[in-house]
Image (spheres, rainbow, N blue to C red):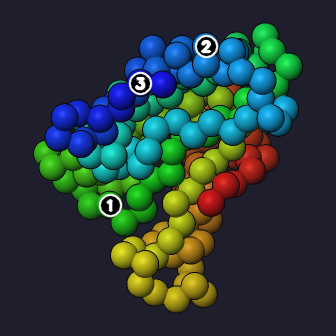
Amino acid sequence: IEKGFTPSGQWLMPTVQTVQKFIRTLNGATPYAKTIYVVLGNEPTHGAMCGSCTPESFAKWSMQALELLDEASDEHEYDIVAGLAGQDLASPQAPAQGYYDAEVFMAGMFKAEPDLICNLDVWISHSYPNSFVGSPFDAGRRSPRGYEWELDFLQRNEPVSCPGHVKSLPVLI
């Protein structure tokens, strides 16, 4: 749809125009399925993977994107199911180098856009052990069951405007 990289290969932060172009492309196509899954961004806790976004800029863009996708879904015969890109749950907290701890990043997103949680159709998780080492039977934030840690975080930060929404969110890993 558009070039999403700098000349040096770094990802660019998506824009509202990116979403509008995606919707125009979708409108010109005949979707194979009635349900279309959309992942917003890519590992925003890594600056190089999501255009050096901050929690606040990613939250603002995500809210705009979710609104546009919801409008497009209402206007057409397909259902758009959208969620935020999975976080790298092992990312360090080093904003100057473009890295954010996942908990700090999510807290910043939901502080900037408190109703962002309410607008999600699905939770997308990158649940795997850091550097792919560890047992598939491990539990906790940096394990194949990291999504449980994320859901707990979401439930603790769920706004009063959508009680129970987190418990109803499907999880895609």
Q: Earlier in the sequence, mark 2 or mark 3?
A: 3
Quarter of the figure that contains the C terminus: bottom right
Q: Would you say residue 6 is visible in this rendering?
A: yes
Task: Residue type at mark 2: give it.
Answer: Arg
Q: Name the spot of residue 25 as percent of width and height, x first.
A: 61, 19
Q: CA distance from mark 2 to mark 3?
A: 13 Å
Q: Is 1 left or right of 100, judged from the image as shown?
A: right
Q: Is residue 82 above or below residue 145?
A: above
Is 96 in front, or is 49? 49
Q: Residue at horizontal 46%, vertical 38%?
A: 41
The label nearer to you, 1 versus 3, is 3
Q: Earlier in the sequence, mark 1 or mark 3?
A: 3
Q: CA distance from mark 1 to mark 2?
A: 34 Å
Q: Earlier in the sequence, mark 1 or mark 2?
A: 2
Is 11 in front, or is 74? 11
Q: Name the spot of residue 166 as percent of width and height, x first.
A: 70, 46
Disc 3 residue crowd, few under 14, some 14–19, many 20+, Cα 10 Å: few
Task: Residue type at mark 1: give it.
Answer: Ser
Q: Is residue 76 above or below residue 111?
A: above
Q: Is 57 left or right of 116, judged from the image as shown?
A: left
Query: Mark 1 = which residue?
Result: 91
Task: Residue type at mark 3: give it.
Answer: Glu
Q: Residue at horizontal 43%, vertical 78%?
A: 132
Label ID, residue 2: 3
Q: Quadrant of residue 54?
A: top left
Q: Residue at horizontal 36%, vertical 75%?
A: 131
Q: In terms of secondary structure, where does tag 3 sit?
A: loop
Is there CB contact under 8 Å for labels 2 and 3? no
Query: Mark 2 = which residue?
Result: 24
Q: Residue at horizontal 63%, vertical 48%?
A: 123
